[in-house]
Image (cartoon, rainbow, N blue to C red):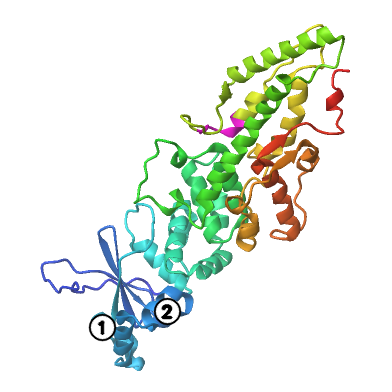
Amino acid sequence: MATEPVKMALETAEGSEDEPPLDVAVITAVGDLVLEVSHGGETFLYRVSVASLTKTSSYFKNLLEGDFDEGIQVQRKLKTLDRNKIAELPYDALPLVKISDIGRISKVNTIRNLVEDFLNIVHGYALPKPPPVSNLANLANLAIVADRFDCLPSLIAADRRLKFIQANEKRTNSGPDSEERTRQKLLIGILLDHSPWISISSKRLIICGSTCWKVDAVDDPDAALWWDLPRGIEEELVCRRNYLLETLESLQSHFLKLYTSAERQCKFGYYEASLECDSFQLGQMLRFFQRINTLRLKGTLVAKRGTHAYSGDIERILDALYSCRTSQIYQHSHCGLRARLIPLLEALHPLIRQSQVTDLGICGDCWRLHRIDYAWTLAKRPVAWGGGKLGSLVALRRRGGPGSAACLASHARVRELCMATERDWTRPGSGEENEGE
């Protein structure tokens, strides 16, 4: 168990008597090093063990045992210490190392407890009860600090032992998470290898969009790391959302192209009646797409010259498309957009609804194990996708274990649809081509 933090007055590095003394938090009573940690105008001292730091963190191993001047001086100082009396030595007799960057954490009242929790984990000690990391923002900040000093395995091991993530899941409110909480969960999932949070949170951002991706968004260099997700995740989310919007827009483009082509769509009745039916359905189709605001001569979902991409919730687009009504002329009740659109929407339904976790969100295991073959940002766009493959989406179920070849293959089916340069939504063999007869 860690000893209680001990407060002791020390002179500052400059030794000025006019400046207030600094507190020292004792992580281990037999510590042979003092860390001076500064952030946001605060400075705190921590008595720590060099052996514990270098064993769990490659950052500290390189700093304290490498060829840096600071490390060389520390090693020289350590050799002069009497190892049998380490616990009796005053703090100013120990080597001191200054740390001025603990990572892109959010604004906190004080960094003292955060850094102390981090160092206790590094040393293998317990945290206060209830642990402060049962708060989602605290856990995210702790993960950022651990990532900064390259000792995430220690935090992952502590999570498995002390159930930090599980404690946060129990505290989750019944309503949907805010974007910030969603991003915090995604960052924690990324850094602590917790795939469920990666998949669920990434899908939510892809579907709902982000304030960070809007045209008028302002970059804040002091924002916490979860507002600019690392390891290529932020770019991957934007990429997947843009391709999904393009996929939905291709639905209306498909039907507009069919009904403005020379090929007769209505197969019911005489030739003249079929022509009138096609013209009527085209007019109804244009009115519908304009009414739900997905078409202004050109689609409004994907960014084009002089326009911006749709930034709202994609589930609303799905709901709007579902609202398409049946329109008919000459009792042609099976003609029109709704009869042909709804089956396609039902196939896309599990892909888009947030409540259904499918391959649209990022699979943490495949991202970690097969990123080159899995990431949409690294993939080459397929030339074409045909509606005959819709069956694989309707029955979309992941087979095999997470990160397996079968798991990767199931993700590829969705990527192939969303990234295709051209999509033909006609379903061969479905009877659609004979619809209305």
Q: Residue at x 26, y 80 (%)?
A: 91
- Locate residue 335, reporting x and y percent: 79, 16
**Side of 270 where 201 appears, left or right:** left
Q: Residue at x 53, y 44 (%)?
A: 238
In the figure, 189 relative to 259: above or below? below
In front: label 1 or label 2: 2
Q: What secondary structure prevails in the magenta region?
A: loop
Q: Residue at x 44, y 55 (%)?
A: 138
Under mark 2, the amino acid is Lys
Can you identify the residue that label 1 sits on? 90
- Locate residue 38, reporting x and y percent: 29, 65
Circle 2: element type: helix
Q: Residue 92 appears in which quarter of the rendering?
A: bottom left
Measured in 3D between alpha carbons, the distance from the residue under mark 1 to the one under mark 2, in whole angstroms, is 24 Å
**Could you say which is closer to the camera, residue 66 or residue 1?**
66
Q: Residue 118 appears in which quarter of the rendering?
A: bottom left
Q: Quadrant of the C terminus?
A: top right
Can you identify the residue that label 2 sits on? 61
Q: Residue at x 43, y 36 (%)?
A: 215
In the figure, 7 relative to 39: above or below? below
- Locate residue 15, reporting x and y percent: 14, 74
In the figure, 223 relative to 268: above or below? below
Magenta-tinted stretch: 309-316
**Side of 48 where 377 appears, left or right:** right
Q: Residue furthest front?
A: 262
Badge 2: few (under 14), some or many (20 or more) residues near its Cα, within 10 Å?
Answer: some
Q: Residue furthest right?
A: 437
Under mark 1, the amino acid is Pro
Ranked by sequence position, the earlier of labels 1 and 2 is: 2
Circle 1: element type: loop
